[in-house]
Image (spheres, helix red, strand yellow):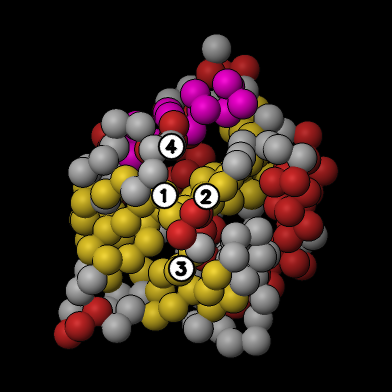
Amino acid sequence: MAGSLRVSVIDYDAGNTLSVTRALEKVGANVDLTSDPSRVLSADAVVLPGVGAFGDCVKKLRERGMDEACREAYEVGKPFLGVCVGLQILFDGSEETPGVDGLGILSGNVVRFSANGMKVPHMGWNQISVSREHPVLDGLDGEAFYFVHSYYPEPESGDLLGTSDYGGSFCAAAGRENLVAVQFHPEKSSRAGLKLYENFLGWARRG
């Protein structure tokens, strides 16, 4: 039963935690919104949201000891979902905040849109194309999700799960092993977003 799965949503004063929590609860998760690393490590699954600047988000994570909690949760195999800037900070670094290291769980850097004359930030609904099948993206190829961002990661090819197009193709989803992360906001993406969170719970239960 989905409600028996305890999902820690990492609360580090960086954005969209309440809307993420509500969306997860709507699809049946038992959500623990927490700023305590030990509770993250005792959860069945972990969600890392994020809104704002890369450097600020990394700083807030480190102040709470959540950077190490995220790495450890990944290393011990907990199902892990990153959302928006929660995707970007999983990488090595970002052009947005040069000199600030990300978590380095995924290899690659985060770059700013050149967007070929398109407005930056990229804001609004855009379809995703699934590059590699993954249970969290099951049934979502071609669905539209809501994006708000000026930067996107460039993962190693094996970690790319999905793309979208804005003046050219860019990474919309990435992951490896027990980790998956998306650039868009599922919690602002209506039915398709709830389907993604539902898929994540199903994947976590099987995990």
Q: Check contact, mark 1 vs mark 2: CB within 8 A.
A: yes
Magenta: main secondary structure equals helix
Quadrant of the image containing the C terminus: top right
Q: Amino acid at mark 2?
A: Gly
What x and y, as percent, mark residue 90? Answer: 60, 61
Task: Report the disc number at residue 161.
Answer: 1
Q: Amino acid at mark 4?
A: His
How far is the residue under mark 1 from the one under mark 4?
7 Å
Q: For label 2, count other residues whose C-alpha is less than 10 Å away and answer few (under 14), some (14-19) or many (20+).
A: many
Task: Using the image, determine if residue 79 lies above or below residue 62.
Answer: above
Task: Report the disc number at residue 137.
Answer: none
Whether residue 202 appears in magenta in the rendering, the answer is yes
How far is the residue under mark 1 from the one under mark 2?
7 Å
Image point 26% across, 50% down: which residue? 128
Residue under numbered circle 3: 153
Image point 62% across, 17% down: which residue? 4
Q: Check contact, mark 2 vs mark 4: CB within 8 A.
A: yes
Residue interval drawn in magenta: 193-207
Q: For label 3, count other residues whose C-alpha is less than 10 Å away and answer few (under 14), some (14-19) or many (20+).
A: many
Which residue occupies the extreme right position in the image? 38
Q: Check contact, mark 4 vs mark 3: CB within 8 A.
A: no
Q: In the rendered structure, which disc, 3 or 1, sits on the residue that comes first in sequence?
A: 3
Q: Amino acid at mark 3?
A: Pro
Q: In the rendered structure, which disc, 4 or 3, sits on the residue that comes first in sequence?
A: 4
Q: Is residue 23 visible?
A: no
Task: Report the disc number at residue 175.
Answer: 2
Task: Report the disc number at residue 134.
Answer: 4
Mark 3 vs mark 1: give the one in front.
1
Q: In the rendered structure, which disc, 1 or 2, sits on the residue that comes first in sequence?
A: 1
Looking at the image, which is closer to me, 164 or 67? 164
Whether residue 42 appears in magenta in the rendering, the answer is no
Q: Amino acid at mark 1?
A: Leu
